[in-house]
Amino acid sequence: MQSKNFDYSIIATLFSIIFDFLDGFFSRLIKNKNTFGKELDSIADMVSFGIVPSIIVFLLLEEKTPIPFIEYSAFFISIFSAYRLAKFNINSYNYNHIVGLTTPLNTLFFSSLSIIITNHTALFTDKKIIYLIVMLFMIFFSCYFLVSQITMFTLNFENFYWKNNKIRYIFLLISTFLLLTLHMTALPCIIIFYIITSIYFHRLKQKNSY
């Protein structure tokens, strides 16, 4: 397995995320509600953020799994990504929060994880069973969070008051620290931290509403 191939995949993923953001931003800016464009965008998202993470996980499992054909379980990510994208098309977008893990973040997680794994191959050489179990858990949790009803915050600032954006400031501060100290290794850590933080504030909000 060549780490160079995964280096290209994370670069492509980052460009896909940037262009996906710009596409949505300019569509909202010019108030374009073209149905054809919306469906075309969904197809592009399915390729970039549905099929790509499955291929990455498939390749990560292919050379290290002791169980034949288990690597095909990676394509559950594509199935659940398709389900999420279909739900997103029929639901309205909320500026302050989203429901479940977005497909771009899910893809970024596996793309960055692939760099870490391929650059530290020796760590997994003699631990194939543990490696397989961890990867299967990641597939499971990826699929779960893609379609979960957990409210996750966005980084959209309506104003810059601490009270209204406390969760965003805390997240950005810790994420910056992780990036400066861990560099590329920080990306999957930041995404996990984002999920945990969202779950915490989601539970806290539910508790306060009772």
Image (spheres, rainbow, N blue to C red):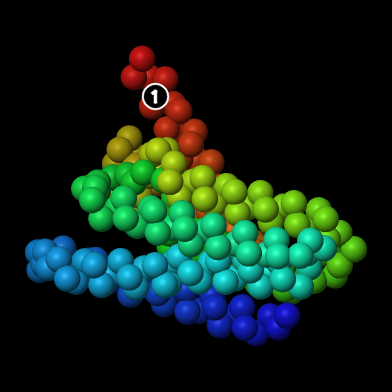
Residue carrying label 1: 206
Instruction: Give the camera-side residue of 45 and 98.
Output: 45
Residue nearest the viewer, comparing 77 with 185: 77
- Identify which residue is drawn at 68% across, 80% down: 3
Given the image, on which type of amino acid does mark 1 rest?
A: Gln
* Residue 73, percent from left and from top: 62, 59
Quarter of the rendering occupied by the C terminus: top left
Q: Is residue 117 visible?
A: yes
x, y percentage for residue 94? 24, 46
Q: Quadrant of residue 71?
A: bottom right
User: Residue 45, percent across and down?
Assistant: 36, 68
Give x and y (percent) for residue 46.
39, 67
Say left or right for 57 vs 145.
Answer: right
Residue 137 appears left or right of 192: right
Nearest the camera: 38 or 204?
38
Q: Residue at x 86, y 59 (%)?
A: 127
State the quadrant of the N terminus: bottom right
Can residue 177 be spotted in the picture?
no
- Tell me if 3 is positioned left or right of 80 in this view: right
Q: Relative to 161, is 117 above or below? A: below
Badge 1 element: helix
Q: Residue at x 86, y 67 (%)?
A: 125
